[in-house]
Amino acid sequence: APMPLPNMKTAAIWISLTLLFIIVAAALRTVFQRHLLFLRELDANTRQAYIVLAIAAAGLLAWAALPSLQIESLDIAGVKATVGKLQQQVDTLEAFFERKRIEVFDQHNWGRVRVVRKPRKADDNFVLEVTLEQEPIPGSVEVYEGVLLMPEQRYELNGRVVRFPANTRTPENVLTVKYYPRLITGEPKVTQH
């Protein structure tokens, strides 16, 4: 019958004990000036290597000696979260990203685009306004004229109405508005199976 493979924790204990033996032997070689085969003495040149061995041995020994750990909560900089709540937040975040909306304005629906202001000088832009199908979360709106992202710091948002700078007032370059809509209270959540 084949021999069974050793348990991972048992193997970790033997490896850590071997590493610790190497460190002790190096220290003894330094003290007694004995020449042990393939073992360098502990000095300034080998100190870092032996420190790494000691840390690896201590880590393996701790992992093997401690009972299996299950992290149930996380406390970082005064913020505490439990694993269950973190999983809920991840699920909520995934549902949030699934709600992303993309509205395209071209020659078929250009009537929904309104010119608010024409350029006053040569280096000025048109200001256009569109009414979106849903109210976006502030800061989530991106407006593209063709492939060009319009300057976000100049967006104005009022409910479902978005004003933004543009280079033209005609549908030659398609306008694309990307945003995340607000979740309306009582709205059913979309779940995928």
Image (cartoon, rainbow, N blue to C red):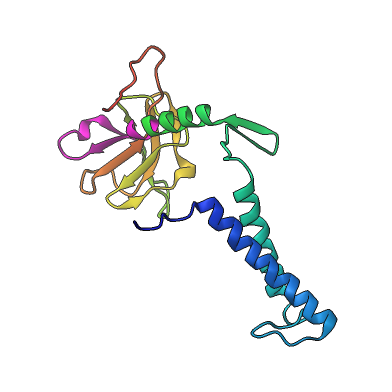
Residue depicted at 75% across the width and 70% down the height? 24
Residue 47 appears in the figure: no
> Residue 33 vs residue 182: left or right?
right
Name the residue at the left extreme.
Answer: 108
Point out the residue furthest to the right here.
Answer: 31
Residue located 72% across and 71% down the image: 23
> In this picture, which residue range is highlighted in magenta?
96-115
**Residue at (38, 41) in percent of width and height:** 142
Quarter residue 110 falls in: top left
Image spot of residue 158 (x, y percent):
44, 26
In the figure, is residue 166 to the left or right of 63? left
Query: In the shown orientation, is residue 50 left or right of residue 70?
Result: right
Q: Nearer the viewer, residue 18 or 100?
A: 18
Question: In the image, is residue 153 above or below residue 72?
Answer: below
Residue 31 visible in the shown view: yes
Nearest the camera: 109 or 83?
A: 83
The percent position of residue 134, horizontal first and vertical second, equals 33, 24
Q: Indicate whether residue 107 is drawn in magenta.
A: yes
Give the image quarter of residue 71. Answer: top right
Q: Residue placed at 65% from the left, 67% from the top? A: 19
